[in-house]
Amino acid sequence: MSNQIYAVIMAGGGGTRFWPWSRLNTPKQLLTIIGQKNMLQHTIDRITPLFKPEHILIVTNVLHREQIQKQHPQIPPHNIVAEPVGRDTAPCIGLAATIISRRDKGSTMVVMTADHIIDPPERFRMMIETAVRVVQENNSLITMGIKPTEPSVNYGYIHRGKQLSELNGFRIYTVDSFREKPDKKTARYFVSTGEYYWNGGVFVWKTAGILDCLTQFMPRLADGLLRIGADLGTGNEQATIEKEYQSFEKISIDYAVMEKAKDVIVIEADFVWDDVGTWNAVERWNEKDVLKNTVLGMHHGIDTHSCIIVNNESHLITTIGVSDLIIVHTKDATLICSKQESEKIKKLVEELKQKGGYSYL
């Protein structure tokens, strides 16, 4: 039986909470938000000591395939997989599993997203090696749990069950249940018990195992994946993918499989994790000036405190007597937002869509 391990990086999200910097053509995962590299490159760098480039698949939107190929030439072009439309994580993972299965039926998959910050990367790689060992021994589905640092309402939670083992310093538990994003009161309860994790969006399983689960719980999706698999490597490949995707239900892997399957276990992460979900992450991961402002680009301020100011243009932003604002300037759109209201940016983008403002998206 094969012991080959493949990494799947899901890079198809729109990153609407990072508007107006993140756009349809340049989503969050392709932006240089932290340091000198874009988020996708940080993810690739994090895992390359474990995975050969030919064993790394990037699943993205068809709009971004050429851009990713140009920016990341170390990844073989046939490993950059284009979805014709976004259908959430279950079809994305199913497509990747179908492609990998055709290459190596006995392989193991490690699935992650392209827009997380994880530190130190060495400890993350050790967690992956530990989870792969567990999967190859008992065919479980493994998810990564993050110990909450606050009662966040922005993440789904995992309620752990009994402890199964401890390997390489990582505690491994059964999963009692998955819980949707809670209200604040419920989130406080989750954190107070010490039994709940944030759902970290990293999965490890055998390729055949996840395809079997999709067959069991999502038969229509599985049938479509079989038709795609039959045409992989032929002249009909892209046309079949486009045709099948139109009928795929938009559903996450958590809803489709993880909440229904048996033998789901969670490995407790003990490293720093940040999903870089909102503009506030820019503040967490970049230097601040003496007045606690985080500034990327040209800015001069008087009595300006605790602001996030991002300027992509050769255009001076000036501020007087403001605090706790997010100010983002691009060539065709400017955002001014209270830091406490940043979760409404996604709603703003939806309203722009409804009003036909697609040129700004």
Image: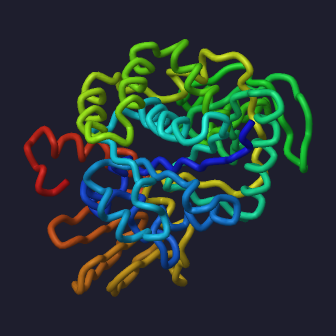
Closer to the camera, 34 or 59? 59
Q: Is residue 97 visible?
A: yes
Q: Determine which quarter of the picture holds residue 262.
A: top right
Q: Position of residue 301 (x, y in %)?
A: 35, 84
Task: Give the position of the N terminus as an image quadrant.
Answer: top right
Q: Position of residue 194 (x, y in %)?
A: 79, 34
Residue 118 against residue 4 in the figure, above or below: below
Is 72 left, or right, of 163 in this rendering? left
Task: Give the position of the C terminus as an image quadrant.
Answer: bottom left
> Which colour style is shown?
rainbow
**In the image, what residue occupies the spot 75% across and 64% down?**
122
Total numbered labels placed on residues in the image: 0
**In the image, what residue occupies the spot 74% across and 33% down?**
266
Closer to the camera, 100 or 260? 100
Q: Is residue 341 visible?
A: no
**In the image, what residue occupies the spot 69% across and 65% down?**
49
Q: Position of residue 141 (x, y in %)?
A: 69, 29
Is 12 left, or right, of 6 in this rendering? left
Q: Determine which quarter of the picture holds residue 317.
A: bottom left
